[in-house]
Amino acid sequence: MAKKILITGATGLVGKELKNQLLNKGYEVNTLSRKNSSDPNNFVWDVYNGKIDSRCIEGVESIIHLAGEPVAEKKWTDERKKQIIDSRVKSTELLYQTIQNKSDHQIKSFISASAVGFYGDCGDEILTENSANGYGFLAECCKLWEDAVNKGKKLSLRIVKLRTGIVLSKEGGALPQLDKPIKLFVGSALGTGKQWTPWLHIDDMVAMYIYVLENVKMEDSYNACAPFPVTNIGLTKAIAKHLKRPFWPIKVPKKVIELLLGERAEAVLMSNNTSAQKILDAGFKFKFTDLDEALTSLYHK
C-alpha cells in the first residue's frame, strides 16, 4: 500500500511541486488548505480559529509542514508580524493537537520548513546548524516557529527542520522580485552588496524534502542551501548576465531601502553565510551547486 503524506502549504511555490513529485513517485498525498476544493484528498482548516478537519491525518505516516504567511509581501505592521508568527506557530500547534486527539494515528515524522533568518545578520561568519539564534524579527519568528515544531518530540515524532535560503524559481518566490529591476535596466547591488545570500534551485529544494522524508535517520535542523552561497553583488551580476542586462556599479544605499521597505529591509540586507556540510554529510546530492548552472536551467530551458 502506498505511503500517505499530509502537506500543508501545498498551493505555495515548493508545496505545489513537491505534491506533484510525491504523486509521481506513488505516494498518496493529503493537503490542508483554507478553502474547499473538488479534490477528495484536500481538507479544510482555519488556523486562526483553531478549526481543522481531523480526517486529514487518517492513514498518514508523515507530515510536511510548509504553511505560513509570506514574509516580505506586505508592510511589517505589528498586526502583520503577529500574522507571520501565528500562521507558523498556531498551525503547528493545531496539527499536534489533532495528532494528540487521535490515539490510533500512524504519524512517525514531522518535517517542517524553517529559514536561514534563524541566525539573524551575521556578516561573514560561517553558519552551521549549531550556530546561535540571532537578533531581529526574522530570527525571533524562526525561533518561535522551531520551538513549536520541537514540541512534537513529546509525541515521539521524528522532527526535521529545513532552514531554507532563497529558493530560485521563475514560478514565484524571490527570483521574480530580484530580476524585476534588472529587466528594467536598473540592476545594482543592495546596501553594501557584500551580504551573503544562501540560495538553492527549486528542484533541489523539492528533492531535499523527499530525501528527508525517505531517510528516517535524519533528525533536527539542516541548512537547506546550496554549498556555495554568493554575495548580493554576485547574485545580481549573475542574473543580469543571464538576462543580458547591464549591472550598474552604483549601490542602492541602506537608507533608501529602509525608506522603501521599512522594517522589511532586514530581509534584504541580512547576511547569512550558511554551510551545507550537514546535509551533504547526510548523503544528499545537489543537482545544482553552481549558481550559473542553476540560472541557466531556469532562464534558458
Image (cartoon, grey):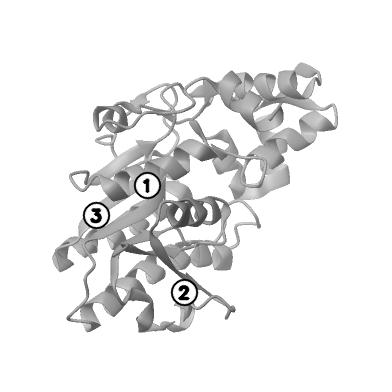
Q: In x, y percent, where is residue 88?
A: 43, 63
Q: Which residue is mark 2?
A: 41
Q: In x, y percent, where is residue 213?
A: 31, 50
Residue 25 can be seen, yes or no: yes
Q: In x, y percent, where is residue 232?
A: 59, 25
User: Which residue ends up furthest to the right in the rendered image?
Assistant: 184
Residue name at image x 51 percent, y 54 percent: 20
Q: Which residue is mark 1?
A: 210
Query: Which quarter of the rendered picture does the N terminus lie within?
Result: bottom left
Q: Which residue is mark 3?
A: 159
Q: Are marks 1 and 2 in contact (CB under 8 Å)?
A: no
The three-letter code of the residue at mark 3 reads: Ile
| SS for dot 3 | strand
The three-letter code of the residue at mark 2 reads: Asn
The residue carrying pointer 3 sits among few (fewer than 14), some (14 to 19) or many (20 or more) residues within 10 Å by Cα, namely: many
Query: Which quarter of the rendered picture does the C terminus lie within?
Result: top right
Residue 118 can be seen, yes or no: no
The residue carrying pointer 1 sits among few (fewer than 14), some (14 to 19) or many (20 or more) residues within 10 Å by Cα, namely: some
Q: CA distance from mark 1 to mark 3?
A: 14 Å
The first of marks 2 and 3 along the sequence is 2
The first of marks 1 and 2 along the sequence is 2
Which one is in front in this view, the residue at disc 2 or the one at disc 3?
2
